[in-house]
Amino acid sequence: MNTVKLHDKEFGVFISCDEIAQAVNKLAERINADYASKTPLFVAVLNGSFMFASDLMKLIHIPSEITFVKLASYSGTATTGKVNELIGFNESIEGRDVIILEDIVDTGITLEILVNLLQDKKANSIAVATCLFKPKAYTKKRPLEYVGIEVGNEFLVGYGLDYNGRGRNLADIYKIIK
Ligand code: IMP
Ligand code: MG
């Protein structure tokens, strides 16, 4: 198996870049169709979503805008349950059809905070597009509109996801081995 070592841990390929590309393609097709008569504002959550956002946006053919925010709730391989940082939101959200772009939705804590924030700013509608989703870890009731690939509770790296800062640049998604 193709493996990579990041800090003290070893990871093996779990989802290939081809599989990711197929999933992203399907999401883009659905968004292009669902928002054909709208001009959505994509809100990409940094750092993790940068690769997903970049690949997806190249396949969006309807009029749209993108902005970036930063919200962090992770330290190492376990959630800290608290959000440490928020940067961004210079544009007016009021009346916009917002599509949040996430690398992965785990417990859903980060997402809930962002959704509440966008509601406070009077977005007309809010949808979520996430590359990966951990349904078994999800603690919230809110359904996710656009899910690329559902995964288990294992810790993943690559395609934007990091282990203590490493691995975001990997084109495939890797799973922890040891
Ligand atoms: P949540 O608030 O628990 O849903 O966590 C969401 C954030 O945690 C994601 O945007 C990622 O940055 C990070 N995260 C969740 N699961 C993983 C993983 O398996 N590997 C790397 N980062 C993860
Ligand atoms: Mg993230």
Image (cartoon, helix red, strand yellow):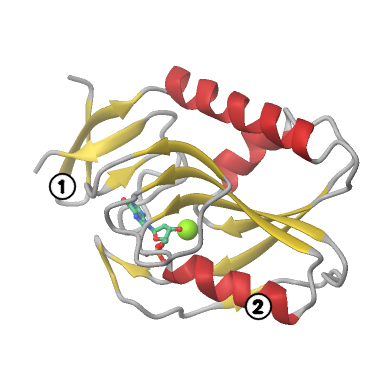
Residue type at numbered disc 2: Leu
Quote the CA–CA distance across marks 1 and 2.
36 Å
Which residue is labeled 1 in the image? Answer: 9
Mark nearest the camera among 1 and 2 is 2
Does residue 119 lie above or below 47 as drawn? below
Residue 99 versus residue 2 in the image, above or below: below
Which residue does the image show at 79% across and 69% down from the upper left?
123
114 relative to 150 in the view: left or right: right
Front position in the image: 37 or 74: 37
Q: Report the quarter where the N terminus lies.
A: top left
Q: Mark 2 points at which residue?
A: 117
Residue placed at 38% from the left, 39% from the top?
A: 158
Q: Nearer the viewer, residue 28 or 166?
A: 28
Residue 113 in picture, x, y percent from top left: 54, 75
Residue 133, percent from left and from top: 40, 47
Say whether residue 84 is left or right of residue 58.
left
Which residue appears farthest toward the left when viewing the image? 178
Foreground pick, 154 / 31:
31
Callout 1, which amino acid? Lys
Q: How many numbered dots are placed on residues in this image?
A: 2
